[in-house]
Image (cartoon, helix red, strand yellow):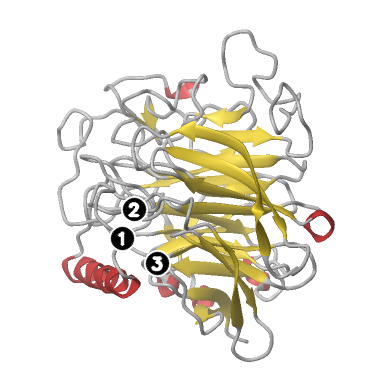
Amino acid sequence: MILHRRDGGGRARRPALVRLFVLTLAIAVIAALAACSSRDREPGAANEAGAKPAVTPPAAGERATPDGGSGDETGGKEPSAPSRASRDDAALYWEDAFGLTFDTPVGIRHAGDGSGRLYVVEQPGRIQAVDPGQGRADKRLFLDLTDVVYDRGWEQGLLGLAFHPDYADNGKFYVNYTTRSTTVIAEYRRSESDPLKADPSSACVLLEFGQPYQNHNGGELAFGPDGYLYIATGDGGSAGDPQGNGQDTGSWLGKILRIDVDGRSGGKPYAVPPDNPFYGNAEGALEEIYAYGLRNPWRFSFDPVTGDLWAADVGQNRREEIDRIEKGGNYGWNVMEGTECYRSRSCDPDAYIAPVFEYEPQSEGASVTGGYVYRGRAIPGLVGHYVFADFIDGRVWTLDADGGARDAVEHENLRMPGITSFGLDEAGELYACLYDGRILRLAAKPK
């Protein structure tokens, strides 16, 4: 998911101030009318007819189901209603992190090099380095990829950033971005002459694969505790996965991929981990696949304590879901949407891995933004809880990851429309990127 635009990618990019005005107006309309756009909008999805964007508020409209009905005839289980936050949780609040604004921020990451520096991913194609320092923070352009990034389709652009576990020594980092018709995963290096900047000439493309539509590009990158690079891809876009990419193990789309960036094999600029579920198969499945059956996984993250992989998968019409990703797991799309049968009134839910948590759209719009399991020190009561949000209506939830994640707690006081992504600093404290350009930090009032 990332930013939704109804221009189909053909309209020229609007100036930043105009985009912010449009967003502010859209959110105001949503709040006033309690109605969102078609379920085919997510922050970061481009729209063909009925396509759901991924990081921009949707325009008002009716939801359509695969068969054009009301959405009440599909089979499946009803999701449990999330519980409300207790009064003790009212101590949590958002605060401005830096006193700075950015151009459509869709990610905030740290390099793990002990510098305390944070890096903000701007969808048009830039990475800004931020040194919080004392008082007002400073930002500096780390890398400008606007000459290769295509971001005119709302869900297209620079979507992901991951630093190599040994970045402090080797200076390597990885980006995920779209061209007009492809997704690119590329390696870059830190500049040798200026350690606070990247070297644009160091680009090495690891993967590039086609995108049939402008939306559902996934975009997340992260290194797992095993040292391998994990990559989220959407189903290729349009609505309903018309090409069946989610269930096609011969397709790059609708997957979590896993590669070894430190190895080389088969003429590729990376190696395939030998314990990948399809490694060495003779059926034509891509060996890079780690898990599949996903629609548009918009942000995943690893719990630094347990190593569990948490992902948020944006739904079509009736379900937004949180998944715990398992190696070789099939999460059902487009046979299932969450715990509901999608393509027909009957299916076999037991053939797929069910979400840990799911919810229905509120005011006929939703787009889940995945977060992190909090392991910081500033908010002891939040330790071990997975934090996530809905981009459209701004609801924020926590799941008790250490306690089995049975129920989600909705935190009314943290409601914040326009959260495109979450991130952590080196101390494990939680940040949120807003579509309007701000970066917020989660804090707690002292008792």
Q: Quadrant of residue 214?
A: top left
> Which residue, given by chain and number where applicable, does mark 2 sit on?
152
- Residue 101 lies, with reference to residue 244, above or below; the image says below
Q: CA distance from mark 2 to mark 3?
A: 15 Å
Q: Secondary structure at mark 1?
A: loop
Give the left or right position of residue 76, taking residue 94 as reference.
left
Labels 2 & 1 near each other (Cβ < 8 A): yes
Identify the amino acid type marked 1.
Answer: Arg
Residue 108 in sight: yes
Mark 2: secondary structure: loop
Residue 60 image offset from top left, x and y in percent? 17, 56
Give the image location of residue 44, x and y in percent. Answer: 39, 52
Quadrant of the rendering where the C terminus is positioned: bottom right
Name the residue at 72% across, 46% down: 307
Q: Residue at x 77, y 67 (%)?
A: 193
- The answer to whether residue 254 is visible is no
Q: CA distance from mark 2 to mark 1?
A: 6 Å
Q: Earlier in the sequence, mark 2 or mark 3?
A: 2
Name the residue: 24% across, 54% down: 11
The earlier-in-sequence mark between 2 and 1 is 1
Q: Residue furthest top?
A: 282
- Amino acid at circle 2: Arg
